[in-house]
Image (spheres, rainbow, N blue to C red):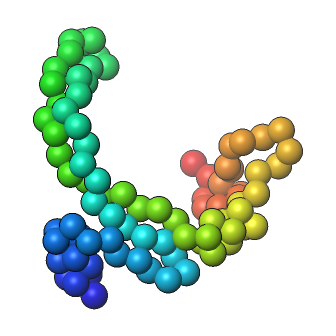
Amino acid sequence: MFDMMGAALMAGENVKLTGFGSLQVRARAQRIGRNPRTGSEHMISPRHTVVFTPGAQLRQALQDKVAPAKGSSAVTAEDTNLPAG
């Protein structure tokens, strides 16, 4: 399955996963990057990257499951059922 998805993406096709979302290849232009430690600038070469767009069902399920409390935008360990720390 993943081999077929990879082949489709390499051929420039979009991959749609019903009820989950879609994957597509997008071109990123050449741009100036900055080393955060030293502040020096350097050119980042143009490249292609895979972009995931969640489908409506996934967005709705996530919104229903992980709705932040009023006045808070942070997700805590309790919200995700993950151990704290």
In the image, taking residue 79 as reference, residue 4 lies left or right, namely: left
Q: Residue placed at 21% from the left, 12% from the top?
A: 40
Is 7 drawn above or below residue 66 in the view shown?
Answer: below
Is any atom of residue 24 visible in this view?
A: yes
Considering every residue shown, the one lying at the far bottom of the view is 1
Residue 11, how many percent across, how many down? 16, 71
Q: Residue placed at 83% from the left, 38% from the top?
A: 71
Q: Residue placed at 13% from the left, 35% from the top?
A: 45
Quadrant in which residue 38 is drawn: top left
Residue 56, how many percent across, how many down? 61, 70
Nearest the viewer among 45 and 77 is 45
**Quadrant in which the N terminus is drawn:** bottom left
Is 42 drawn above or below residue 71 in the view shown?
Answer: above
Nearest the viewer among 44 and 75 is 44
Quadrant in which residue 24 is drawn: bottom left
Is 55 drawn above or below residue 35 in the view shown?
Answer: below
In the image, taking residue 65 as reference, residue 4 lies left or right, namely: left
